[in-house]
Amino acid sequence: MTIRAIAQVGAPVLRQPTRELSVVELQTEKWQGFIDDLIETMFDANGAGLAANQVYESVRICAICVRPNNPRYPYKPAIPLTVLVNPRIVPIGDETFENYEGCLSVPDMRGRVTRAARIKVSYLDRDGEAHEKTVSGITAGTFQHEVDHLEGKLFLDRVEDRTTLCTWKNFARYQEAQFAKEVKTIVEKYGS
Ligand code: ZN
């Protein structure tokens, strides 16, 4: 396994919509090895997720995993390791919540974005099996962030109130206490 370099904001690969993989392609050694690298790189960087185009492969694959007490996001509910191939998201209902997001491709910057509170995610797992599941709350925000990457979008595009943009240090200093309270309410409401 190889830790791959993470593309930083301004790299064109982050702005190009990725292409879907066929099940036959997915099952090749090349793409199975790539998925191992993607997971390893995500863990190495303490990310909550990582999309293929963040490591310069423009294909529709992302990985998500939040271990308890992730140092970047200590307040996030845990999410088991999930590899999504060709994922599609459809919002359920019109409830939203505000998420304070950061990104491994946007160094030292966080900002508030609005996310759907309940979504339906359909995807293939790394073996090519089709799945569909409902995801809610903070966890739904993480899924939307990663699938946005696969469409060539960054969380920055969704920050409506630009006065919320802040460095990680200033997030901890001025925003984290308030946001942690909001997260508690969201987790109580949606269970994740
Ligand atoms: Zn990101």
Image: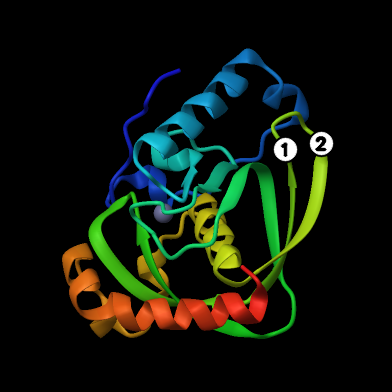
Residue found farthest to the top? 29
Task: Return the x and y of residue 87 as percentages of the image width and height.
Answer: 68, 50
Which quadrant of the render holds ligand 1? bottom left
Q: Which residue is mark 2?
A: 129
Task: Return the x and y of residue 148 as percentages of the image width and height.
Answer: 52, 59
Look at the picture and state if 137 lies above or below 54.
Answer: below
Determine contact: label 2, label 1, CB under 8 Å.
yes
In the picture, the disc for residue 167 is none
Q: Residue at x 77, y 32 (%)?
A: 128
- Name the colour scheme: rainbow
Task: Return the x and y of residue 181 as percentages of the image width and height.
Answer: 42, 82
Q: Amino acid at mark 1?
A: Asp
**Mark 2: C-beta under 8 Å from nearest atom of ligand 1:** no
Label 2: few (<14), some (14–19) or many (≥20) C-alpha neighbours in 10 Å: few
In the image, taking residue 80 as reference, residue 46 lies left or right, namely left
Asked if residue 14 shows in the view, the reply is: yes
Look at the picture and state if 176 lies above or below 10.
Answer: below
SS of the residue at dot 1? loop
SS of the residue at dot 2? loop
In the picture, which quadrant includes the C terminus? bottom right
Asked if residue 18 shows in the view, the reply is: no
In the picture, which quadrant includes the N terminus? top left
Q: Which residue is mark 1?
A: 125
Q: Amino acid at mark 2?
A: Glu
Label 1: few (<14), some (14–19) or many (≥20) C-alpha neighbours in 10 Å: some
Give the CA separation, mark 2 to mark 1: 5 Å
**Mark 1: C-beta under 8 Å from nearest atom of ligand 1:** no
Q: Quadrant of residue 3?
A: top left
Q: Quadrant of residue 116?
A: bottom right
Q: Which residue is at the front of the view, 153 or 43?
A: 43
